[in-house]
Image (spheres, rainbow, N blue to C red):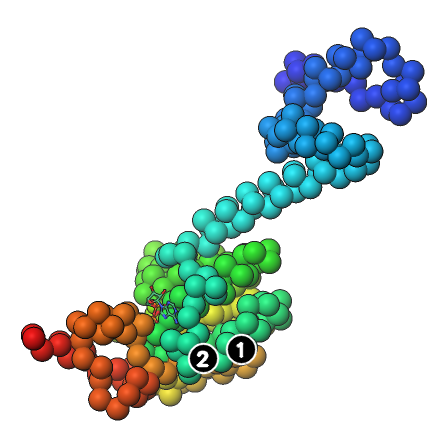
Amino acid sequence: MARTRQQTPAPSPASLAAAKPADVQRLVEELDSMLSRLRLGAIREQLDGLLEEAAQRQPNLRETLAWLCAAEVASKEQRRLSMALTIARFPFVRTLESFEFDAQPSIDPGKIRDLATCRWVANGDNVVLLGPPGVGKTHLEVALGREAVARGYTVQFTTAMELLGALVKGQQQGTLEAKLAQYSKPKLLIIDELGYLPLEPQAGHLFFQLISRRYEQGSVLISSNRPVEEWDEVFGDQVVAAAILDRLMHHSHVVTIRGDSYRLREKRRAGLFRTPAGGSSSAGIGGLPPPTPAKEA
Ligand code: ADP
Ligand code: MG
């Protein structure tokens, strides 16, 4: 197809010096469309304001250009970030800033801040978060995932049920290869809530295939309410569980959280439940006693 769009001639420095005022004026009139063609939307939209701001400082041409480019870079980075966060499919917004370390003394804040640098993602290492319900595992997964997105890594969040459901379905429908490829793609795959619900008999084998593919290539951040010693029960197969753990734990950082559910803690504060006997951090992994309703006064 013939190009009908009129191409604006690009003036070279020599021709700009010699250009007639009418030619320069024509180029200025074309500025908007040239910026669109170059996909410099932020400069195009903010040009008047940016030039006004810049003029107040009387910058030279190079400084003005740097100023405009910075606006474009900031806008592109913002768009990249919001797209990457959409693709990651986090269940909610949680950040490290909003995590109260005082509420969960079994967590070493230094270790989490170190993980927030995402060196482990760069190295293809894994992180395993263990602890009873409500202690902040998903919160930390989302917060660390967002740190990885901010550093330019591709991230995908899923639950163990969703992931294994997709792999089982893939196997039944002859699309397992595509599913394995899909979950192998992101640099960081976050798998939430392993161990909460019983898995299908073939789930362990499929999970092993995925973990093997990702081994030393991409990172896995996985959370579970069951200690790793119980994963053979989770997968219903000792040999498969051992093979999964062998790869997952080879280059890994394990964070074990002990203590009360943050949700119940809030409720206890509000007087809805009694504090369990033995203090605030008596519960082990999966060992949180069922909450006792507070007696009616
Ligand atoms: P888990 O995944 O371990 O079951 P969640 O991460 O879902 O627990 O935490 C339950 C709720 O409590 C979430 O809304 C989370 O943001 C909040 N929460 C848990 N721990 C903390 C904490 N230490 N500081 C702030 N909020 C927390
Ligand atoms: Mg959770």
- Residue type of the residue flagged with mark 2: Ile
Q: How many marks?
A: 2
Q: From what the image shows, is residue 178 above or below residue 294?
A: above
Disc 2 within 8 angstroms of ligand 1 (CB): yes
Q: From what the image shows, is residue 155 above or below residue 16?
A: below
SS at mark 2 in the image: loop
- Residue 59 in the figure: left or right of residue 144: right
Q: Quarter for ligand 1? A: bottom left
SS at mark 1 in the image: helix
**Which quadrant of the structure image shows residue 70?**
top right
At horizontal 55% and vertical 61% (from top left) the residue drawn is 148
Q: Quadrant of the N terminus?
A: top right
At horizontal 82% and vertical 36% (from top left) the residue drawn is 62
- Residue 241 in the figure: left or right of residue 211: left
**x then y, percent, for residue 271:** 18, 73
Q: Are marks 2 and 1 in contact (CB under 8 Å)?
A: yes
Q: Quadrant of the C terminus?
A: bottom left
Circle 1: is it few (<14), some (14-19), or many (20+) Cα within 10 Å? Answer: few
Which residue bears the numbered disc 2?
Answer: 107
Q: Report the disc number at residue 111.
A: 1
**x then y, percent, for residue 223:** 40, 73
